[in-house]
Image (cartoon, rainbow, N blue to C red):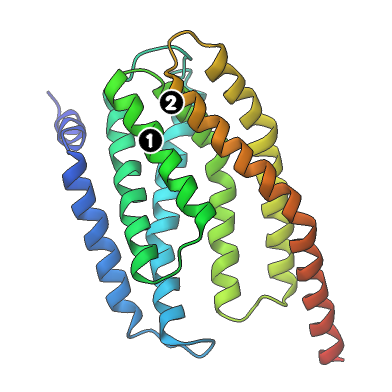
């Protein structure tokens, strides 16, 4: 066995308890460092929240790259059993969502729609763990949903540092809406359809995909108002500058 094979086998041997520990340690360290960051644009809690976005973006990129690698290499086959790599990936994401939920309560930043989303995702992951099926469908769903999440974190950081009225923020807002609609509604609908059409995809995984899709539809209906608000603030900033 080569060195790379040994490292790969060691990584796959991680348990969900271990990944919970490492995510918790990462967030604790970054939140601690947030106390020493400059906070010219807001209160100290906002600065800590910005530093907490780093593991969010890291998780998003890690999962996204891994899932797209699976997709582009033809390893995603609806109806197939869970692989060891899928199990490892789900342990990372499941522990991430558990830690993120706890952090939202600790910072008192939770919203009911986000909590519902987190519960749905964890239920989907756990169902796939227990049944051994549905992981390929979940990987395909992640390929549809995660790109918009990464853009969303960038938008959040710009908002917290006081750039909400900037042209860059408006461009990121438009990019977010575009990626969200194409990924979650267009491609996401196709994946959810295959979840229900597949004989081996567990019912709870299909319900999870449907729930996330319905959440996305509701959010799309709210997008025109969000865009109008961003354009309004941008125009106000231009008038003040003049």
Q: Quadrant of the C terminus?
A: bottom right
Q: Residue at x 67, y 53 (%)?
A: 176
The numbered disc on residue 204 is 2
Residue 65 drawn at (x, y percent): 45, 39
| Residue identifier under label 1 | 123
Asked if 91 appears above or below 171 in the picture, the reply is above
The residue sitting at 40% across, 54% down in the picture is: 58
Task: Point out residue 208 in the picture as x, y percentages from the top left corner.
Answer: 49, 32
Q: Position of residue 49 (x, y in %)?
A: 43, 72
Residue 151's x, y, as percent?
Answer: 59, 55
The image quadrant that residue 7 belongs to is top left
From the viewer's perspective, tell me whether residue 25 is left or right of residue 153: left
Q: Is residue 196 left or right of residue 106?
A: right
Identify the residue at image location x=62%, y=31%. 188
Q: Which mark is residue 178?
A: none
**Disc 1 to disc 2: CB gap under 8 Å:** yes
Between discs 1 and 2, the one toward the N terminus:
1
Q: Is 128 situated above or below 118?
A: above
Furthest toward the top, the residue is 199
């Amino acid at each position: 066995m080569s060195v790379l094979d040994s490292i790969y086998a060691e990584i796959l041997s991680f348990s969900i308890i271990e990944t919970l520990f490492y995510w918790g340690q990462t967030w604790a360290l970054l939140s601690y460092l947030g106390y020493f960051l400059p906070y010219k644009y807001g209160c100290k809690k906002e600065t800590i929240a910005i530093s907490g976005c780093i593991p969010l973006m890291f998780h998003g990129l890690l999962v996204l790259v891994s899932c797209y690698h699976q997709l582009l290499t033809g390893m995603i086959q609806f109806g197939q059993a869970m692989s060891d790599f899928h199990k490892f990936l789900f342990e990372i994401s499941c522990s991430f969502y558990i830690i993120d939920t706890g952090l939202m309560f600790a910072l008192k930043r939770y919203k009911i729609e986000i909590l519902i989303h987190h519960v749905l995702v964890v239920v989907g992951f756990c169902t796939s763990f227990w049944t051994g099926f549905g992981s390929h469908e979940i990987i395909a769903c992640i390929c549809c949903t995660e790109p918009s999440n990464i853009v969303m974190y960038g938008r959040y950081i710009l908002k917290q540092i006081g750039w909400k009225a900037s042209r860059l923020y408006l461009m990121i807002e438009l990019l977010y809406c575009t990626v969200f609609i194409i990924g979650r509604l267009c491609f996401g609908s196709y994946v959810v359809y295959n979840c229900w059409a597949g004989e081996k995809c567990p019912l709870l995984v299909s319900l999870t995909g449907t729930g996330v899709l319905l959440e996305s539809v509701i959010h799309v209906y709210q997008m025109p108002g969000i865009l109008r608000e961003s354009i309004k603030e941008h125009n106000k900033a231009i008038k003040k500058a003049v």
